[in-house]
Image: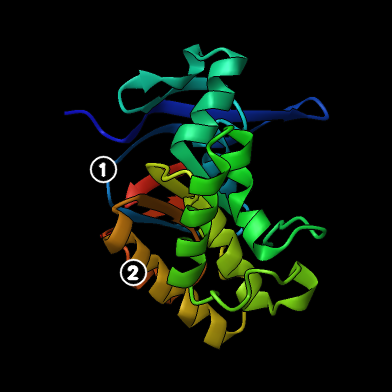
Amino acid sequence: MQYLLETKGLTKVYRETGENLEILKNVNFQLDEGCIAVLTGASGSGKSTFLNIVGALDKPTAGSVFFNGKEMSKFSRREVNRFHRKNLGFMFQFHHLLSEFTALENVMMPAGIDRRNESESRKRALELLDVVGLSERTKHLPRELSGGERQRVALARALMNSPGLIIADEPSGNLDEKNATTLRSLILELNKKFRQAFLIATHDAQIAEIATHRWVVAHGNISAYQ
């Protein structure tokens, strides 16, 4: 069976002050297309490290990562860049919007990097901003938006190039309960609408409740929630 995302024997060791710190230990993980998978676990358990590796932002010490059956460690730097543009969208605890660009321009950014048709990209970005409830905020700069609105712009941006997988690291961690609830509802709605998979590291128990698959990260291991 071919998974959207799979890891085999994934290990990450940091070497600091002469000591080896094993963050991930021989992790085997599978994610199907269109799923919402949530990683839970204590701070420092390795959730972010795992996301960085499967998102090709970092390299494992040992083991392999496969995306649609292709082993990512064999990608050249150019292929990794193309892989990011075509297959992945990212969300983080802090929105990382560009302050000098409007909401619309921020959402369009991934398409611009991928050199897509500007007119079609604008249409797609406007559609996404409407879906996340920000059709009246397209010309606003990040400083003119609330924290919840900025995170919804970041979600729309992550979806811009129609990636197969959205990787989100504590996406509701910097939001109040009202905005966190809105974000959870949007993730569920967008997953159903666009059928893109979500891989989310979170401490938010309510996000875990909407997941189709739940995994627990502890002591360097990742195991299915029982």
Q: Helix, strand or loop at disc 2?
A: helix
Q: Which mark is residue 32?
A: 1
The image shows residue 158, relative to residue 139, as above or below, that is: above
- Residue at horizontal 76 percent and vertical 58 percent from the top: 101
The image position of residue 21, as x and y in percent, is 66, 34
Instruction: Using the image as rendered, state which of residue 206 and residue 87 is in the foreground.
Output: 87
Residue type at numbered disc 2: Glu
The image position of residue 170, as x and y in percent, is 57, 62
Q: Is residue 191 left or right of residue 178?
A: left
The image shows residue 106, relative to residue 16, as above or below, that is: below
Query: Hey, which residue is sitting farthest front in the picture?
Result: 119
The image shows residue 41, relative to residue 137, as above or below, that is: above
Q: Which mark is residue 189?
A: 2
Q: Helix, strand or loop at disc 1?
A: loop
Contact, CB < 8 Å: mark 1 with mark 2? Answer: no
- Residue at horizontal 59 percent and vertical 43 percent from the top: 110
Q: CA distance from mark 1 to mark 2?
A: 18 Å
Residue type at numbered disc 1: Asp
Q: Is residue 88 left or right of residue 61?
A: left
Q: Is residue 75 left or right of residue 139?
A: left
Confirm whether residue 219 shows in the render: no
Query: Hey, which residue is sitting farthest left in the picture?
Result: 1
- Residue at horizontal 54 percent and vertical 74 percent from the top: 135
- Residue at horizontal 60 percent and vertical 55 percent from the top: 107
**Label 1, residues with CA under 10 Å away: few <14, some 14-19, many ≥20:** some
Q: Is residue 200 left or right of residue 29?
A: right
Instruction: Using the image as rendered, state which of residue 19 and residue 215 is in the foreground.
Output: 215
Residue 15, by quadrant, is: top right
Q: Which mark is residue 203?
A: none
